[in-house]
Amino acid sequence: MRKKFMIITITTILFLIIAGCSTEEDTGSDESQQETVELEDQNNQEEYLGKNLDIGVLGTPPEISDEKINFSSVEIEELSIETVEQYDGFFIMEDYLEKAADGPYSDIFEKSDVLFFFIQTEAYYFPFVEDEISYSDYSTRINDEEIYALGYYPGDEENIRTWQLDITAQDPSEEEKEEIIKGLYYEMFNIIRDLEK
């Protein structure tokens, strides 16, 4: 009974307090697409049911164990359009956000045909695609601590798509936070799968 109550509680928490939605920022194009991401069937958040995904990771891969998800670590020196396009999606983890944004990588993020997720960014995607904007300056101005991940798909210049996945729970316990984050990763996997259709 207690386990059932906990599952219902976590499902309710995920459904009510995690808002996964993207932002449409001014990119100079009127054609940017805004995506709304809502956690669908909560039972699917415990298991990924789509096709196998190969995800490149700059930094330490997330601790998600799923036989259909393969994470491959990539060194920052190896970043190129050719490298990232080998994967279905690409995660830039928190410890590499500033290096990736402030390095010579903006063309990779802006011109690759792959969906990027910037994990725990406080600066949206602008510092990653604009050389004139530093990550630390922009994150200080924005400082959005609710963002857990920001998805960015460059498409073509007229078809940029973004997704924002937030943690809005007030003071969740460590166990609740781990479950919320796990659910957000499964939602990222679903976004990657759906984008490729």
Image (cartoon, rainbow, N blue to C red):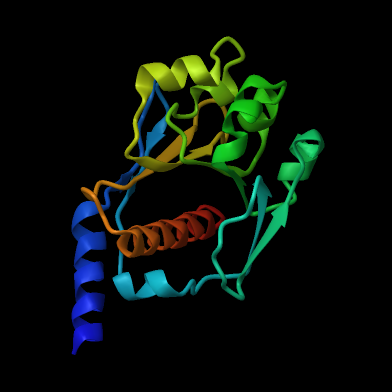
The quadrant of the rendering that contains the C terminus is bottom right
Instruction: Tell me the residue at 26%/55% (across/down).
Output: 172
Q: In this rendering, does residue 63 appear at all? A: yes
103 to the left or right of 119: right
Q: Quadrant of residue 61?
A: bottom right
Q: Is residue 2 left or right of residue 182?
A: left
Q: Is residue 107 left or right of residue 195?
A: right
* Image point (30%, 64%), residue name: 40
Residue lying at 80% horizontally and 34% vertically, measured from the top left: 77
Residue 179 at x, y = what percent?
36, 64
- 75 sits to left or right of 136: right
Q: Nearer the viewer, residue 48 or 145?
A: 145
The vertical placement of 170 against 26, above or below, is below
Q: Nearer the viewer, residue 107 or 168?
A: 168
Q: Position of residue 103 (x, y in %)?
A: 69, 22
Quadrant where the N terminus is found in the figure: bottom left
Farthest-out residue, bottom: 1
Outermost residue, top side: 132
